[in-house]
Image: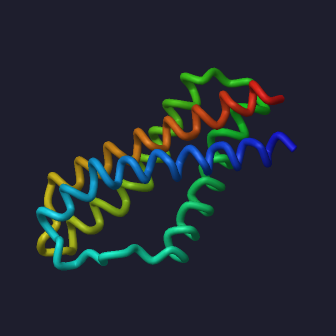
Amino acid sequence: MSLVILYITTFILFLGLDYLGLTNLVKPVFDRHISDLLLEDFRILPAFAFYAFYVAVLLWFVSWPALVQEKTLLWVLGNGALIGALGYGTYEFTNLAVMRDWTWEMVVTDLAWGATLTAVSATGGVYISRLLA
């Protein structure tokens, strides 16, 4: 049951925080550089698939080991940031390497946001799961 609580809390935190970050941090930067490529409304199915899979991977490598092995929240924060930097960095640096209008500003903004979002979501999920256990 604790795995279900961990997944749900992490998923909710990730979605809520990412909505705020995408709206206030990432979208304005991307609008400046590639607005003609962006959809008016996002496609919900691919977004949901990404979130569901990403949070599951985050739990596998960071959050669940933290609960089982009683790792510190600082450990969760650091390892969550690494997973976030890996995931978002893969996307950003690949785009910078192959897409004409991709910019360093987009890379830095999204990479920093992804690392922060992932770290905070993992840490919050573990913290809440420990409180409810």
Vertical position of residue 131 compared to residue 17: above or below: above
Q: What's the residue at 61%, 63% (across, down)? A: 53
Q: Residue at x 21, y 62 (%)?
A: 30
Tell me where residue 32 appears, x and y as whole percent.
12, 62
Apparent side of residue 27 relative to residue 102 in the rendered image (left or right) = right
Q: Residue at x 12, y 74 (%)?
A: 100
Q: Position of residue 61 (x, y in %)?
A: 63, 45
Q: Which quadrant of the structure image shows residue 123?
A: top right
Q: Nearer the viewer, residue 75 or 10?
A: 10
Q: How is the image coloured?
A: rainbow
Residue beneath the point at 52% across and 30% down: 77
Considering only vertical position in the picture, is 114 above or below 41? above
The image position of residue 52, as x and y in percent, is 62, 62
Quadrant in the picture for the N terminus: top right
Residue 65 appears left or right of 96 = right
Compared across the picture, whether 75 is left or right of 104 comes to right
Q: Nearer the viewer, residue 16 or 115?
A: 16
Image-quadrant location for residue 43: bottom left
